[in-house]
Amino acid sequence: MPAAWGLPSSRRLVGAVAGCLLAGASWTAVYASGMPVPKVLALLAVPVAMGLAAIIAHVASGTPGLPAAGRRFWRLITASIALVGIGATIIGQARLNPAAPDALRLVKLSAPALVLGVGLALYALLRLPTRTQSRGEWVRLGLDALTVLITTALFLWHLALRPMVERHTDVRLALGLLLLSTTCLVALVAVTKVVLLGSGPVSPRSMRLLAAAVLAGGLGSAVSPLIASPRWVGLQPMITLLEALLVACAAHAQTVPLPEPAAPAVAARGRAYSKLPYFAVAATSLLLAAVAYGDHADVGPVATGAIAVSAVVGLRQLVALRDNAQLLTSVRRHEQRLRYQASHDALTALVNRARFTELLDEALALPTVAAHPVAVLLIDLDDFKLINDTLGHGVGDEVLVTVAERLQRAVRHDDVVARLGGDEFAMLLRDVDGEHAVDVAGRIRDTLSTPIHTAGHDLLVHASVGVATSAHGDRLDTLLRNADLAMYAAKERGKGGHFVYVPGMTTRIVAHAELGAQLRDAIEQGQLFLLYQPIVRLDDGHTTATEALVRWRHPERGIVPPCEFIPAAEQTGLIVTLGRWVLREACRQQAQWLRDLGAGAPQSVSVNVAGRQLTDPQFVADVAAALDDAGLDPWRLTLEVTETAVLDRAEAIATLHALRGLQVRLALDDFGTAASSLGLLLTCPVTSLKLDRTFVDGITAVARQEAVATAVIRMAQALDLSAVAEGIETEEQARMLRHLGYRFGQGYLYARPLAAADVAALPLTAALPLAVADGAAAADGAALPLAAADGAALPAPALAVRRQEP
């Protein structure tokens, strides 16, 4: 019995029941010794003990927090104890006075109460909810219960019923005992079922005690003929008192919380009861041995029962073996599924990053890799975030699945396609050279050129592909890094392209990263400044607007050319922060000119915008905030975007429409250099076109350049757009452009990029001599050799840097 009990009153009640058992044992011992002792003491012990047990069971039914099924169970057990107590009291009166004329009648009267009480307990047990069982578990449970039933019935037959039959005992009495014994056996099976399956809301400790009580009652009924001696008349009530104590302890245990977690207790109990069939075999074997070496009269029935028990246990073993085999197969299948899930992407069924890395490592470890190199292609979908944000993740997932299928069709059977995560894919090509890898990159472009139809949309997906082969590094991390660098280089060149890693890229990327880190400090420490190149009216040279151009005065290197730090800003992602600073500073300066110069000030300022800014969700808000802080009218700001920055980019087009909603002007910069310039005029809400300087350079000598310039001005006039010619360096170019219809232009003929103070000092109505512009720029300390600005081409989305803008 546990050391710690719950309610003090329950503890005292259990103690009282234990006292009744002790008193009954003392009375039996004294009576058996022949000493005179009142029989009324033995007669009162049973009803008192059973009554106290019923009270404790009733208390258990009101345990706080006990589910409704548990309360119902204990109420039924209370009624069962009361009925068994009544029956036991009646039969106890008959046993204490066997010579009384109504003794046999009392025995017969007790049977209905006892059977009804045990049946009520059986009903309570069977109504308890249990955990869900598989079919195999139910079969094993049934075989276990059958084993208990056969074994107990065998002992009941040998110890009780067979002696009664041999003595020709009263048939009605034998039938009553047989009914009672059978009911006890069925109740024992019910207890076995609850113990094995779990007792639901009833405490497991309580169920074990109740099982012991039912077992004690069944054995008491079985051995009742053996203890019919008048000398040991008190032994039968002793069994009833023991039942009362076990039931009282079971009811009280319901009120005491378990000290250990319920799950481990259930698992341990299941392991203990799995030995039950073997105990049954051992018990029947012992009984068979006892009969075989003793009284041979009953060897046939006992042997039959032992064979039956052995057969049931053997059948149970076969069922268990079958279930174990099924469980083992299920475990192996589950392991395979887990192994597959650990190495494959759940959405696309491609191998995942971990498995791709393993396969690449294995391929690089082959001794033949030098003669038969491998290639890695890293593939990143362009603008995929826009699909998720506008159409939802469901559509995005369908696009990823379709892309995965197309990528698999673009490679050989033994090549590997993987999804590394998000919209990033990878390919492992075995036994290839750089030329074959480039061919695969081309097939990727071709297979993605067909729109993907999903959810009522035809979506055109582009991908940037980086290619690297083991010829430039046979280590896993080196190969992956090279492919990654090539992929980012492909993105800088524009959408839908590929780039092959070449030696030296790493040095250039590292240099960009270092310069990007310094650029971040430069923005915070005020090392950046703006120069402004005038945009003039070609008729009279009047300055109508300016274009803001960012410069960096490095504390150690001096003036850093834009062709160096703009790509670094793109590479490191600082282009958005840099562009935000340029925008705010240009708006502030334009507002300052208007306040200081009035009508003599430039009427507007142009700011170059990178493609990455147009996809920034905060960009429109940044523009509105810059205008508000500067107190500048929106129409005095022109945002210049390159064609490649908006080409096939729905998100960028949407941003431009939002900017036009603010009344900001938009210029399509470097017009004529991209493949889809004419198509952009139908989608971009621009207000002006800027003729690229490549069409101005030879306009006086090359007829085709003149034709292009003519076509651009005619389109601008037809679409009611203004047009600006860039890169004017000679008076002859200016005259030709004026003759073609251009009204505005900019270039070294009029001025280099100037400091803000020098712009304020410009003449308003006369064209500037080139020497004056050069001198102004030099005075600011910002002028650079012309060759420095020509040094390198910029990525398409970068802030514009032209030959005439040092």
Image (cartoon, rainbow, N blue to C red):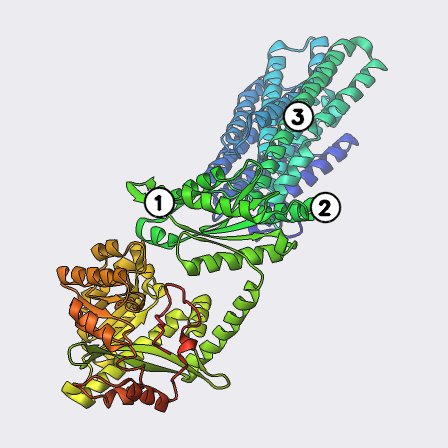
Locate residue 333: give its quadrant: top right
Q: Nearer the viewer, residue 697 or 166?
A: 697
Which amino acid, mark 2? Pro
Element assignment for label 1:
helix
Asked if residue 221 can be seen in this view, the reply is: no
Residue 571 position in % (x across, y down): 46, 66
Residue at figure coordinates x 34%, y 51% from the top left: 387
Element assignment for label 2:
helix
Q: Is residue 702 above or below residue 425?
A: below
Q: Which mark is residue 395?
A: 1
Side of 624 relative to 161 (left or right): left
Residue 185 position in % (x across, y down): 62, 22
Q: Report crowding for label 3: few under 14, some 14 to 19, many 20 or more residues within 10 A (C-alpha).
A: some
Q: Report crowding for label 2: few under 14, some 14 to 19, many 20 or more residues within 10 A (C-alpha).
A: few
Residue 117 position in % (x across, y down): 53, 27
Q: Nearer the viewer, residue 279 or 764?
A: 764
Q: Is residue 132 above or below residue 3?
A: above
- Spatial CA distance of label 3 from label 2 is 51 Å
